[in-house]
Amino acid sequence: MTTQNKTAVVTGASAGLGAAYAQRLADRGYDLILVARNAARLETLASDIRSRTGRAVDVVTADLTDAAQISVVEERLRTDESIEMLVNNAGGGLFTPLATSDAAASEALISLNVTSLTRLTTAVLPGLTARGHGTVVNISSALALNFLPVSAVYSGTKSYVLTFTQALQQELAESPVVVQAVLPGAVRTEFWDGSGADLGAFPDEWIMSADDAVDAALAGLDAGEPVTIPSLPQISDWESFEKARQTLVPNLSQRAPADRYRG
């Protein structure tokens, strides 16, 4: 999966999973476009990667919930023919009962986790398909499957990322462009700061390092997994889950209601 003069775009790249992806993809020979709000951190990371690997690293400071700022990133994704990979990692968390939550905070979370990911994928895809190669990695969450009383909005956004990715995989079934969903569990990053959840309340055995999570995600990508859950011991468990979902499909839309609904 080593490339020559190919570029990977990583959003939310200033810390956590995004920074780990940036390091690993540089190691794999990608030049980088790093996107995040924190310019100082991006520059520090970029300088480190340039000096360590010799790869070219561009920094784009952008708040992906701001229409004018995301449009700059979209334009780069549409026009830069060197782009081979997009890692949609930027995202936030919010853990609170909906009845006591702030609607504006929920809207901002949906904008970041759902709208920006959709817009950036829409921007990059025509170029990847025209060039006949490329990869999109969408970071979902284990809470797309394990929703909690305090995670209605967050789990909803991450369920969107999962189903969006799975539908896109069907759309691109005959294309060489690869789309992967990654569903990490708890990862030791700054994601939790201000989220309403205390990482320190979790048992240590639940918490993965960002480097381990990204290494697992990339191993899953290399293995051709459409969905990678870094801590899941057996991929057959995910396949069984998907098979169970597929058994519903033939009966999801029928002319007549099921017998049990008819008196």
Image (cartoon, helix red, strand yellow):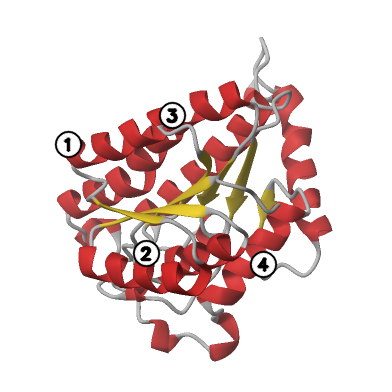
Q: Which-is-in-front pick, marks 1 and 2?
A: 1
Give the residue type that dot 2 points to.
Val
Label 1 and label 2: CA atoms lie apart by 32 Å
Which residue position holds label 2?
150
Asked if residue 145 lies left or right of residue 155, the reply is: right
Foreground pick, 117 / 8: 8
Label 1 and label 4: CA atoms lie apart by 35 Å
* Residue 253 x/y as whole percent: 65, 18
Mark 1 crowd level (few <14, some 14–19, many ≥20, 10 Å Cα) = few
Q: Which numbered disc, 3 or 4, marks the residue that appears first in the sequence? A: 3
Label 4 element class: helix
Foreground pick, 224 / 21: 21
* 72 is higher (above) or lower (below) than 260: below
Label 1 element class: helix
Determine contact: label 3, label 2, CB under 8 Å: no
Label 3 and label 1: CA atoms lie apart by 16 Å
Name the quadrant containing residue 259: top right
Mark 3 crowd level (few <14, some 14–19, many ≥20, 10 Å Cα) = some
Determine contact: label 3, label 1, CB under 8 Å: no
Which residue position holds label 4?
216
Give the residue type that dot 1 points to.
Ala
Determine contact: label 1, label 2, CB under 8 Å: no
Which residue position holds label 1?
68
Which residue position holds label 3?
122
